[in-house]
Amino acid sequence: MPSREALERQVVLFSLNDLPIFLKYIKFLEPKHFSNSIYGEIYKAQKEYYMQELVLHDKKYLIDTFKEKHKESTIINNLDTEQPAVASKKHILGEIFKIAKKRKVLEGLTSSLDLAEEDDFEVGDIEKIIRESLAISYDTNLGMSIFDFEKRIVRLKKLRDEAVKSFSNNLNNITSGGFYPGELYVYMAPPGVGKSMFLLQEANGSLRNNKKVVYISFELSEIRLGLRFDSLIGQMKTKDIFENKQAISDKYTRIRKACPNGEIIIKEFPTKGASPLDINIFLDQLRIYEDFVPDVIIVDYGDIVASATTKQNDYQEQGEVFQLLRRIAIERQVPVLTATQSTRSMLEKKIDDVNLGQVSDSFMIPRIADGLYALCQTPTQREEGVMYLKSLKNRNGPVNFYCKYVVDYEKMYIRDTEN
């Protein structure tokens, strides 16, 4: 492992000789991140010159300037003839990125502590500082030419192969194969229709497809939600679970044997007691301490997740929550499934009349979501044990398409029927 000073010397050498690598550094590396002040000065001069002129400084001129400024130092010697370690550039970039990220986090913590000492500080402001300090990244993707057809088809096939299938074959058909990594899917329904129950089915369906699921609940406790899974998997009413513990245990054993990689981790947060930042931290803890990386994340449900910052009104805060949930999907390259509450008027509407106007609060939700699906049910249909799903927004398939389901609220299951 090269020393910190050796790494910094390589950064300077790349900054003098290699524009493509230099362009990767300047997105996250600041002059103050250097432990050697002279290397930091050279890097700062090159960065400021590039930001103004969009070309690198003349190497000889820059080195001569700093040799004159630091006559007593030998650290600048040979910079004009020494070449960067091109074969190790990926490793050097990674090591410098780690250093820069640590410094950014430390700066964020320091700023947060200073802010916390003020009498009237806002918790949301501290969360924003921490979130920004954790968001440092570099992107090496320079886009794709429209003529790269074959490459694009390969990537599309890989994306479809990685899609997490819904429990509902009808829904898989209208989403071109399931839920795609990096996308946000939202179920909308009035109170009591079955938003959480639908998310429960998706978690169970992913488990049966040998996928790892994180189910984050802001409404039910971990134990209560666990009972719902027991009822669904055991296909029995909740009151019968305690008399049939062995039967349910046997079913879990069979699922574990058939789906050795499948798992559902339930995490409970208080209603409005955690923000998407807290969800991200929890996911990092799962990865670090349990080596658990989910294939799909379910948040039950988005309306009662806390905002990461204090906004002027609930409309703005809710819009931010769904934006950050989609960011989690993109950064972790998994689908995120959640729900939102519709207006109560949707209870009286026929499925043909249900539209985006029934979104209860922030209209940012249909803008942000990759898929928005209304769960529709009149009082008569509830008595009959029937529910409909209507696609209101669907990036990967048709809109205004219906799916019909049979529902058993006591045994917690929803099943496909004809469309």
Image (spheres, rainbow, N blue to C red):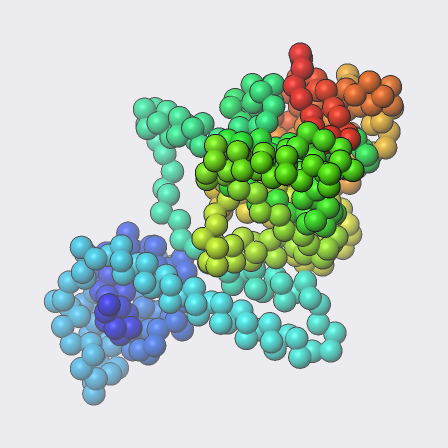
For the residue pair 29 and 300, the one nearer the viewer reads as 300
Residue farthest to the top?
Answer: 418
Query: Residue 149: x percent and y percent?
Result: 34, 24
Q: Residue at x 58, y 47 (%)?
A: 265
Q: Residue at x 74, y 74 (%)?
A: 120
Q: Residue at x 58, y 65 (%)?
A: 129
Assign the C terminus to one quadrant of the image: top right
Question: Horizontal placement of 61 versus 228: left or right?
Answer: left
Q: How many marks?
A: 0
Q: Residue at x 24, y 83 (%)?
A: 70
For the residue pair 101 and 247, the one nearer the viewer reads as 247
The image quadrant of residue 75 is: bottom left
The vertical placement of 177 against 310, above or below, is above
Question: Horizontal placement of 60 versus 223: left or right?
Answer: left
The image quadrant of residue 249 is: top right
Query: Residue 314: x percent and y percent?
Result: 77, 50
The vertical placement of 180 against 48, above or below, is above
Q: Is residue 387 visible?
A: yes
Q: Is residue 366 visible?
A: no
The vertical placement of 6 against 170, above or below, is below
Assign the N terminus to one quadrant of the image: bottom left
The vertical placement of 38 against 20, above or below, is below
The image quadrant of residue 373 is: top right
For the residue pair 415 and 175, the one nearer the viewer reads as 415
Residue farthest to the bottom?
Answer: 72
Query: Residue 104: x percent and y percent?
Result: 47, 67
Question: Horizontal placement of 288 versus 389: left or right?
Answer: left
Query: Residue 72: x percent and y percent?
Result: 20, 87
Question: Horizontal placement of 48 versus 406: left or right?
Answer: left
